[in-house]
Amino acid sequence: MWGALTAAWGTVAIGCGASARTPPNLKPLDEPRARAVIDAAIRAAGLRPEPVPRRVTLNSGRAVAEDATIASTRYGVAYLTGREAQVLGRVAPARAPKNGDEGDELELIRGEGGAVTLILDAARYRYDQGPAHTVNVTTAENALRRDVDDYLVHVVKPDAVE
């Protein structure tokens, strides 16, 4: 279950007599902040987000609410919070939450009418609210922006040129 994706941190002792590390207090970017990052990435690519994103119906009959729909295209982006993922059920393969990892594949789903939606799991874009700040909010936003940029460069723009 996507909502159950959390970092599991155990007690880790390094060397003799080292103290245990406490788990970071990681929180995903909230939806309004994620939408702002997504919209900014779309605009920076020379594209325009629609003022009102669409709902994409999947072959299973379930619908995904996109957080950003790219104007005059069949493409969009859905940022799924834990609650949304639970309501929707599994629409794409689960990925472990990681921040800033290179080489991860984009998760795309196809809907009716040829719609192609990038699925972004909010659990992948987390930052540390605690005093340690092991992952700051800028790092989480940059990871989100990188994934949207990759989608725009490798999926959306090549199709627009054809």
Image: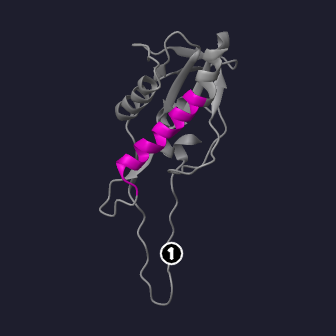
Residue 88 in sight in this render: no
Q: Is residue 103 magenta?
A: no
Looking at the image, residue 126 sits to the left or right of residue 120; the answer is left
Residue 73 location (% of width, % of height) = 56, 12
Q: Is residue 153 above or below residue 55?
A: below
Residue identified by numbered label 1: 12
- Which residue shows up at 43% across the image and 43% down it? 142
Q: Residues within 10 Å of mark 1 (few under 14, many from 20)?
A: few
Q: Main secondary structure of the magenta part?
A: helix
Instruction: State the SS at label 1.
Output: loop
Where does the image place residue 34, in percent across and percent down from the top left?
40, 34
Residue found at the very far bottom of the displayed protein: 16
Residue at left offset 39%, top offset 33%: 37
State the image coordinates of residue 61 (x, y, percent, origin top left).
65, 16
How many numbered discs, if any?
1
**Front residue of 119 and 38:** 38
Q: Is residue 87 above or below residue 121?
A: above
Find out whether residue 148 is within the magenta segment. yes
Residue type at mark 1: give it. Answer: Val
Instruction: Left or right? Give the position of 110 relative to 132.
Output: right
- Image point 59% across, 42% down: which residue? 1
- Magenta stretch bounds: 135-153
